[in-house]
Structure formats: structure tokens, C-alpha cells
Amino acid sequence: QKEVEQNSGPLSVPEGAIASLNCTYSDRGSQSFFWYRQYSGKSPELIMFIYSNGDKEDGRFTAQLNKASQYVSLLIRDSQPSDSATYLCAVNGGSQGNLIFGKGTKLSVKP
Amino acid sequence: DAGITQSPRHKVTETGTPVTLRCHQTENHRYMYWYRQDPGHGLRLIHYSYGVKDTDKGEVSDGYSVSRSKTEDFLLTLESATSSQTSVYFCAIRNQVAGVYNEQFFGPGTRLTVL
């Protein structure tokens, strides 16, 4: 059974701080990794994806991938109250492009 | 906007009744997915489709069936709804423009309550 694990939180950070969200996965053969943001009552929204070891930056977001250790992380710099949401980690799980999702980490950014 | 709509957006039904949820996409994507999301379980794949009339089961397919007679529509049917199927249902499409990278984009969701 392929699994994706996330700390459920809540993770609370002050406004302007760096929020660090972590995810581990069980399938060493996984090749693509995704971070989704989900506001309460809304659908998941893709914010980052990463395929290669190392860092990938997009604005205030940085995704980090370490395949040897089987973890992927998301850093949010200069956190804003509008970043308060649940962040879902997803990993590709099969040849048909299926994704396996973690249960999500709830982030709260305090003004 | 990935051009995905779901209908209905909210539904309340009674145990034992059949229910059909519709997912409609406007961008001709080959792959479509149905997920359910429940507290403590996250997003779980119910069924998916990789083309017209081509469907397969996901992790939690028991009690659900699907049909795809047109590229743009993917239907999820609960033949006889049970209270355990109370959930939020999301449809997703796979962005083939990006090649093998498998990004999925989600519809707005359907909140289903089975009494």
C-alpha cells in the first residue's frame, strides 16, 4: 500500500515568518510530487510541483525534494494570514497518472 | 480555471435511493477522476477514466459505479446510497498539456448528505 504521510497540524506561525510543511512517501519509485492548497469549503488548488531533487522556487513558495530520504517539503516565506489553509501533499502512484494524497497539514498564520 | 463543473453542488438524499453526480469539462482532457474527501481520511480515489468508455476502480470503489459516454462528461452513481457515503465529492482532470507530469485540477465539489 503506497502511502503519503503529513503532520496534520495545526501548524501555527506568525505573520511574516517562514512556514515549513513536510511530507514523506513510501514508494521509492515515485517521480512527481505536488502541493495543493485547500481553503475551508473549497476545492484543492495546485500551487507547486517538483520532479527533480533539490529546490524549486515560485514566488514566496519553495518546494524541496529529497528522493533518497523520500521526503518533500514546502516552504512559505513571508507568511500571510491569507496563506491559512490546509496543504495537501500528493505523489504520483501509478502509470495512469493517479495521485496519492496525504491527509493534509492545516496551517494558521496569525496576524 | 480548468473548465470543470460539477452538478449538483449540494444534495441531501435518503438511504437506499440512487444518486448520480455529474462532472463536466470543457477542455477535452482524456483523464478524469472522482475522489471523495472525508475528515481524517483525506482525498481518496473512487474511480477514474482514461477515455470514453474506459474506466477503472480506485481505492474506495465499493458502492459506486461510473460511466463516460462522452469525453466531456464523467458520471458517478451511487446505486443505493448509504450514510457512509456522506462526503464531499471532487472531480478532477489530468492536464495532458504538461506531458507525463500528471498535474490534476479539481472541480468545485459536490457536498452529499445521505440521511
Image (cartoon, rainbow, N blue to C red):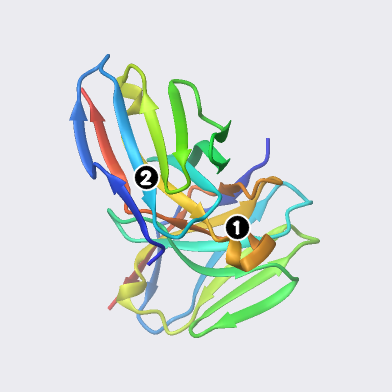
**Residue at screen point 53% across, 63% down:** A35
B105 above or below B31?
below
**Residue B36 rendering spot, x and y as whole percentages:** 41, 39
Residue with the mark numbered 2 = B23
**Residue at screen point 32% across, 19% down:** B82
Position of B44 with respect to B9 (left or right) is right
Q: Seen from this angle, which residue lies furthest front? A: B70
Position of B56 with respect to A76 (left or right) is right
**Residue B113 rendering spot, x and y as whole percentages:** 24, 31
Q: Give the foreground label among 1 and 2.
A: 2
B94 above or below B54?
below
A100 above or below A19?
above
Task: Estimate how packed mark 1 is, as few (under 14), some (14 to 19) or many (20 or more) residues with alpha carbons within 10 Å.
Answer: many
Asked if residue A15 can be seen in this view, the reply is yes
Q: Secondary structure at mark 1?
A: strand
Are labels 1 and 2 on one chain? no
Give amino acid for label 2: Cys
**Residue at screen point 68% across, 35% down:** A1
Tell me the CA gap for discs 1 and 2: 30 Å
Give amino acid for label 1: Cys
Task: Estimate how packed mark 2 is, as few (under 14), some (14 to 19) or many (20 or more) residues with alpha carbons within 10 Å.
Answer: many
Position of A54 with respect to A75 (left or right) is right
**Residue B64 rendering spot, x and y as whole percentages:** 44, 25
Which of B103/A58 is in front? Answer: B103
Q: Secondary structure at mark 2?
A: strand
Q: Are marks 1 and 2 in contact (CB under 8 Å)?
A: no
**Residue at screen point 39% across, 45% down:** B90
Which chain letter goes with mark 1? A
Residue with the mark numbered 1 = A23
Residue B96's tag is none
**Residue A37 rendering spot, x and y as whole percentages:** 42, 63
